[in-house]
Image (cartoon, helix red, strand yellow):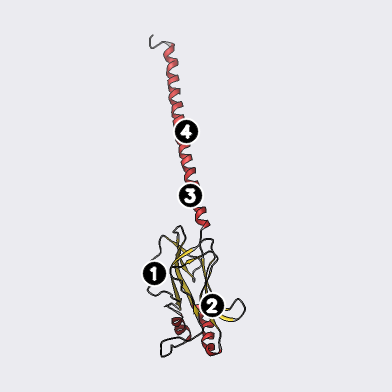
Amino acid sequence: MTDDDPGNAATAPARRDGRWFELVVGASAILISAVSLFVAISANRTQERMLAASVWPSLLFGSSNASTEGEPQITLDLLNRGIGPARLRWAELRYDGTSLRDAGDLLSHCCGALPDVAGDHRYPVVTSGIQNRVIAAGEWVPMLRMPRSDAAASTWNALDRERRKIELRACYCSVLDDCWLFDSAAEDPQPVRTCPAAPAVLWQG
């Protein structure tokens, strides 16, 4: 059969059409695979976000001058208002920029309370340590309680005036090791990859 044979003319377009069909099929398969991979990754990320949200902790620090019963009492409280436990790595309590170790430090700096000859501050103060503590969702931690008494009225009044200058800095993580740097003076906790080194002076209660 010569090159002028009509059979050759019919075969060439058929081969070209076959190649185009193969290319289209191959490209479609690649596109479908890419879309499937994208959908799988997106679904995995969505599941990760949902899991993180289901164990999300959120700390809140506050103070008050009355107990839940309405009695005059200075309180410093830490609350986990999230829906998962907060693993507290460290917590720093500060008054007017000064780091505080305990209630004695606080009363000395804020309220002019001086220790006695034994070095003790004899005031009706109850405190709680919070370092390396796991705070459950919805849990209140009473960091400090000081009911008003006639013997320490001036100190109590001074603490009531100055308590708004008391701030808390802390770093905490979820059970999935998502971590945040909390500052009660800031609007929202700052997400961090890992907790920074703890300050030199931490609240011991």
- Give the mark nearest the N terminus, 2 or 3: 3
Residue 115 percent coordinates (x, y): 43, 88
Residue 6 percent coordinates (x, y): 44, 11
Amino acid type of the residue that numbered disc 3 sits on in the rendered structure: Arg
Residue 68's disc is none
Looking at the rendering, in which quadrant would you find the C terminus? bottom left
Viewer-nearest residue: 124 or 59: 124
> What residue would you read off at disc 1?
198
Label 1 and label 3: CA atoms lie apart by 32 Å
- Do labels 2 and 4 touch, CB within 8 Å? no
Labels 2, 3: front one: 2
> What residue would you read off at disc 3?
45
Residue 103 percent coordinates (x, y): 46, 80
Label 2 and label 4: CA atoms lie apart by 67 Å
> What residue would you read off at disc 2?
75
Viewer-nearest residue: 167 or 50: 50
Residue 69, picture quadrant: bottom right
- Give the mark nearest the N terminus, 1 or 3: 3
Furthest-right residue in this view: 70
Amino acid type of the residue that numbered disc 1 sits on in the rendered structure: Ala
The 10 Å Cα crowd at callout 1, few under 14, some 14 to 19, many 20 or more, is few
Where disc 2 sits, the SS reads strand
Label 1 and label 2: CA atoms lie apart by 25 Å
Where disc 1 sits, the SS reads loop
- Give the mark nearest the N terminus, 4 or 3: 4
Where disc 4 sits, the SS reads helix
Label 1 and label 4: CA atoms lie apart by 55 Å
Amino acid type of the residue that numbered disc 2 sits on in the rendered structure: Thr
Q: Residue at x 43, y 29 (%)?
A: 23
**Relative to 53, residue 146 above or below:** below
